[in-house]
Structure formats: C-alpha cells, structure tokens
Image (tube, rainbow, N blue to C red):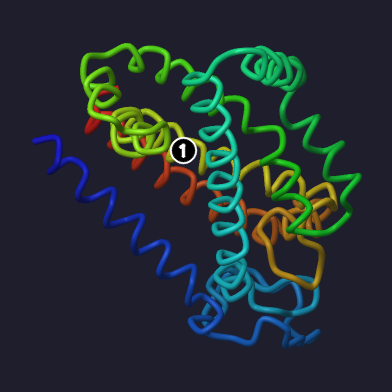
C-alpha cells in the first residue's frame, strides 16, 4: 500500500525533471525574441500567459526558466546533504574533540536565520547562480549534520554493528555497509522536503539580485523584473509565481509520500 502511494508522486517528479531538462527545446517561442507591438499583451492565443514588457512570450520564458530554477534547487539540496551527512557520520561514529568542535560550529550556523545568512554569504560570492547555490548549501548543512549524527549515535551500539566489528570490518566498511543503509531513510525524506524550500530560497536570492540575473530566465528574477507592474499587468508577475507554486507543491507531495513510505 505504501509503495502504491509513492508511484504517482514519483511519476510527477520524474516528468517534471525531464520536462525541466529539455525545457529550452519545448518553448513554443524564442525566449529572446522581442516584439514591442505585442508588449504587455494579456493572456490570449497564441500567448497563453501573455507577454512581458518587451513582447516576449511569458509561457516560453517560464518553461525555459524551469531548468535553472529546479536543478539549482536540487544542487543546493544535494550539496548540503552530502556535506552534512559526511560531517554527521564522522562526528557521531568517531566522537571526540572533532565532534564537539564541529557541533559547536553547526550551533553557530543554526543560531542565525538561514535565509539572512545566505543573503550575506551570496553577497560575498557575487557569482550568480553558482554563488547562490554555495551560499544556501553553506548555511543548510548543519541540519543534515545534526540529523545524521543523531541517527548514527542511535545505531552504532547496535548488535549488527558489534558483529561487523568482530568480523574484522574496518570503519569505512561499517559506515557504508551497515550504518548508512540504516539511516538513509530519514535523510532522503528530509532532502526531498527541502527541495521545495531550496527552490523558494533560490528564487528569493534571484529576486534580490543575488542569484540568476537577466537575461537568464529564472523564476525569482522574472518576478523581480516585473514586481512594479503587478497592479497593471499582473500576468507577467504571476506566471513565474504560479510555476513556483506548482513545482513546490509537487516536491512537497513527493516528500510526504516518501515520509509515509519510510515511516519516519
């Protein structure tokens, strides 16, 4: 039953990822083609989401922006999960001074609002999307470090871990064959639920000019460009906003389904 509940959300995520990857080839119009004669046109055929201030098709730009918006969010989650899990397993299994020091460092990061710290970090990098990814990952890893450390502490005294030690397995073998497979469930669930959050945070950084910058299409920067036109031509601002809403909802549904599947 749990597997059946996971099928449809997984299908939605796979379709979304494939769509985002091939999005530049799926746009009905050239996203750079300007036509001032049709500028600020409301939604109608053939421009079902209207056009922007330069006459560019909004539907095409929203589709093209999905690649950067979605895959940059996935990169953030992957990076902070890998860093956090490595640190958490190291601290939880080996302990000692390194454990104390790294956990105090994570406490410092967790003491600040994540997005505020990410804005400050992204401002230092000033390197577009790459800088925004590094900034968000650098402030997000403590959650995974804390989670994985706690899971390791609860499993490293288990009977099967002691049996692996007695059989002559070294630390690396124990971590990869015994500990990691038994703690991966909660980590995967947390990561899947963080994708939507990371997507919104990436959009927020781009909105502030610290992520993707024009003419690169990205949902956050597209909202930023048209925010002053919300009352006059709302479709220009709402189109990327709707795309963010739908994408975040899909990933959240997928994360909740994973939570039920792993029963965490």
Along the horizontal axis of the image, is 24 left or right of 126?
Answer: left
Quarter of the image with the N terminus is top left
The residue sitting at 12% across, 43% down in the picture is: 4
Q: Quadrant of residue 153?
A: top left
| Residue 67 figure quarter | bottom right
- Residue 206 is left or right of residue 160, and the answer is right
Left or right relative to 45: residue 239:
right
SS at mark 1 in the image? helix
Residue in front for this viewpoint, 77 or 40: 77
Mark 1: few, some, or many residues within 10 Å (few <14, many ≥20)?
many
Label 1, on which residue?
191
Identify the residue at horizontal 61%, vertical 56% (top origin): 72
- Vertical placement of 175 versus 123: above or below? above
Q: From what the image shows, is residue 121 above or below residue 39?
A: above
**Residue 243: image location, x then y, percent:** 54, 56
Q: Where is residue 240 in the image (x, y as percent from the top left)?
A: 62, 57
Q: Considering the image in quadrants, where does the C terminus appear? A: top left
Seen as rendered, the residue at the extreme left is: 1
* Depth check, front residue: 134 or 24: 134
In-front residue for pair 199/244 = 199
Q: Residue at x 46, y 38 (%)?
A: 191
The residue closer to the viewer here, 103 or 160, is: 160
Name the residue: 53% across, 72% down.
48
Left or right, 130 with reference to 49: right
Question: How many numbered tags mark residues here?
Answer: 1
Tell me residue 188's x, y (percent). Answer: 39, 37
In this view, 58 is above or below 218: below
State the image coordinates of residue 237 (x, y, percent, origin top left). Answer: 69, 55
């Amino acid at each position: 039953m749990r597997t059946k509940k996971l099928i449809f959300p997984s299908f939605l995520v796979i379709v979304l990822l494939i769509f985002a990857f091939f999005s530049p080839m799926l746009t009905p119009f050239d996203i750079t083609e300007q036509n001032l004669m049709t500028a600020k046109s409301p939604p109608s055929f053939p421009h079902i989401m209207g056009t922007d201030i330069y006459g560019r098709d909004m539907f095409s730009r929203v589709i093209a922006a999905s690649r950067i918006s979605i895959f940059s969010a996935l990169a953030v989650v992957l990076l902070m999960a890998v860093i956090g899990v490595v640190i958490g397993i190291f601290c939880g299994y080996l302990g000692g001074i390194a454990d104390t020091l790294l956990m105090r460092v994570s406490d410092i990061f967790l003491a600040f609002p994540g997005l505020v710290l990410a804005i400050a970090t992204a401002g230092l990098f000033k390197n577009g999307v790459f800088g925004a990814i590094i900034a968000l990952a650098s402030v997000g890893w403590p959650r995974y470090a804390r989670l994985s450390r706690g899971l390791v502490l609860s499993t490293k005294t288990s009977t099967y871990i002691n049996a692996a030690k007695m059989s002559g397995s070294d630390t690396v073998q124990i971590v990869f064959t015994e500990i990691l497979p038994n703690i991966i469930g909660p980590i995967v669930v947390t990561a899947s639920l963080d994708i939507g959050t990371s997507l919104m945070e990436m959009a927020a950084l781009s909105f502030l000019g610290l992520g993707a910058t024009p003419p690169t299409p990205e949902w956050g920067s597209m909202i930023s460009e048209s925010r002053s036109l919300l009352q006059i031509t709302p479709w220009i601002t709402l189109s990327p906003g709707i795309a963010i809403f739908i994408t975040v909802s899909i990933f959240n549904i997928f994360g909740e389904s994973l939570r039920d599947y792993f029963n965490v």
